[in-house]
Image (tube, rainbow, N blue to C red):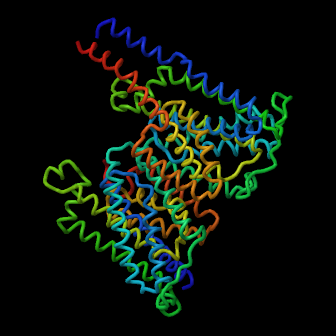
Amino acid sequence: MNSSLKASIIDAHQRRDRLHPYEVLPWLTAALIFFLFPQFLNLGAHVLVTIIFVLSMDLLIGYAGIVTLGHAAFYGAGAYAAGILCVSAGINEPFTGLAVGTIVGGVVGILSGLMILRTRGLALLILSLALLLLLQEAANQASAWTGGADGLSGMSMAPLFGKYRFGLDGKVIYLYSLGVLFVCWLFLRMLLATPFGRSVVGIRENAVRMAAIGANVRRRELAIFTIAAAMAGLAGALAAQIDQFVSLNMLSFELSGMVLVILALGGVSRLYGAFLGTPVFFIAQDYLSKDNPVYWNFWLGLLLVAIVLFARGGVLGILARGFGRMRLQPAASSALSQARS
Amino acid sequence: MALFQTVLGVLLHGLAYAMVLYLISVGLSVTMGLLGIANLAHGIFAMAGGYLTMTLLSAQGWSLPLALAVSFLGIATLGAIMERLLYARLHGASELDQVLFSIGLIFIGTAAFQYVFGPLAIRVSLPAALRGAISFGEFSFPTYRALLIVSGVAVFAALWLSIEHTLIGARVRATVENPTMAKTLGVNTRLLYTGVFALGSGLAALGGSLGAELIPLFPNYASVHLASFLIVVAVGGLGTIKGPFFAAILLGVADTACKLIAPDMAAFFTYAAVFAILTVKPNGLFGIAK
């Protein structure tokens, strides 16, 4: 490989890691909603929390290529950890709850990952599902701690920074969720640009080759699994705090399925798929289930089938293909022909 | 004597439940092994078959054998059409796409059945001949469950004989083992896929119909029981006839026993056991390592 081509490849990689002007759009939108649509702040906070959860799943499914059905296990574990901490231990400082939820999610992740990641394909799907159902049953049975099927209520959070109360207008929970989301986004953005982040994508593309060039595939997969689990735990803890309620639904297969759907809708392994898919999902759900929730499920199913058959990559995938046809493709092909000659 | 009767009761009741699980899951196991598609929506076929049979029984007043036959053929045809139109496009698709696609089908199926039949479980009306019990001295066992055991074992025997001792069976085994080689040797794999998918769907319909009293028919059937069906397939091992049979017996009897000993913890123990088995043997108890 000649040195100028090598330099241009390195340059292209660095350019990809640099912040793009478009990346300010989600934050701009979030700010606009805060000032222009105060009636939607409660819903908005739930959208923001779900984005964090979807991001953690994108890290696992999109970037690491590990398809699971049980990601809600870590979300639920984080939620119950934060809930029990508040109700039973009486520690109701929000950031402590977030930290505990993150740690519990990560610990459940690393312990289950040690077993789940030994397998592939169907076995992995079922093991992850079994883990989720196992935790759900455990939460259902340990009703002294978790409230069982009635859910865990009676959480009352201390004011944020000792000052801002979780009010009914949703202002505090919206900004709180937005802040946590921003930190998560920053973390992911940086993580994916590190050699470790790149190697995880490499393992997704070709695990054998990554092992051949000296990467410890199992250890890296376990690391990314744990990080994704911890982030899901964080999202769960945040959800528990802003709802001041934890239910068995947070440990359900339906929730795992919903997040998968959002990811498919927005676009997998694109980071911004979560930012786009989640609000689209919430708005569509609101609009389509107004008359009858049955119709909503029907259209959702139809949409999923259509995405898989005709529009792989979701909304962002379609956009990327559309723009690619206009702009990226000629550039790529000219670079290719240069490299060949 | 009382203990013996209890143990026998648990075994037989467990076996009856196991045969329903087997009828529904065997098609899933073979199609997954053959086509390599993670079809999470398999339960839809069982549910559709069950609804069809019950409608024919109660609304049309058909006899049970006739209703079962029509349901089997109807759902098998539906399976063949769906394989040709939809599943055929999923060959070689990523695991994520297969999961998303089949979750989509579950949503559609659930919504469609809820729209037509309402959200509640439908009433199962068994023929009078099946409502009684068979007695041996002091021990008695419901006729209906005896029928489940007999039909499950009969289907297993028929499938096992045809897969081990017929030419079509040999073609199926060859294609599970190595599709490219089978194709090269002149096996019409395309037709084989459709045929096996249709048979699997039909058997699921049979299981859904016969098992309707044990596993109630309601719109969320496919997602609620997804884990049970998948567990039978995974523990048994993909692509075999024998694997899901013994896995279903294991699951059915263990589940029934747990429900008797510690009703609250039955589900917990089942999932813990599955977790342990699959961690130690990821290809299942009878699976072929691939």
Is residue B139 visible to the viewer in this orientation of the structure?
Answer: yes
Image location (x, y in percent) of residue A308: 42, 45
Quadrant in the rendering for residue A185: top right
Residue B17: x and y, percent?
A: 48, 72
Identified at 47% across, 20% down, the residue is: A195
Q: Residue at x 53, y 79 (%)?
A: B124
The residue lying furthest to the left in this view is B185
Q: Looking at the image, is B53 positioned above or below residue A161?
A: below
Q: Residue at x 32, y 6 (%)?
A: A3
On screen, residue A40 versus residue B198, left or right, reads: right
Which quadrant does the C terminus of chain A fall into?
A: top left
Q: Position of residue B183 (x, y in %)?
A: 18, 51
| Lateral position of residue A169 relative to residue B223, left or right | right
Q: Nearer the viewer, residue A52 or B130?
A: A52
Asked if one can make out residue B279 in the rendered structure from this viewpoint, the answer is no
Q: Nearer the viewer, residue B43 or A169?
A: A169
- Determine whether, in the image, residue A197 is placed left or right of residue A215: right
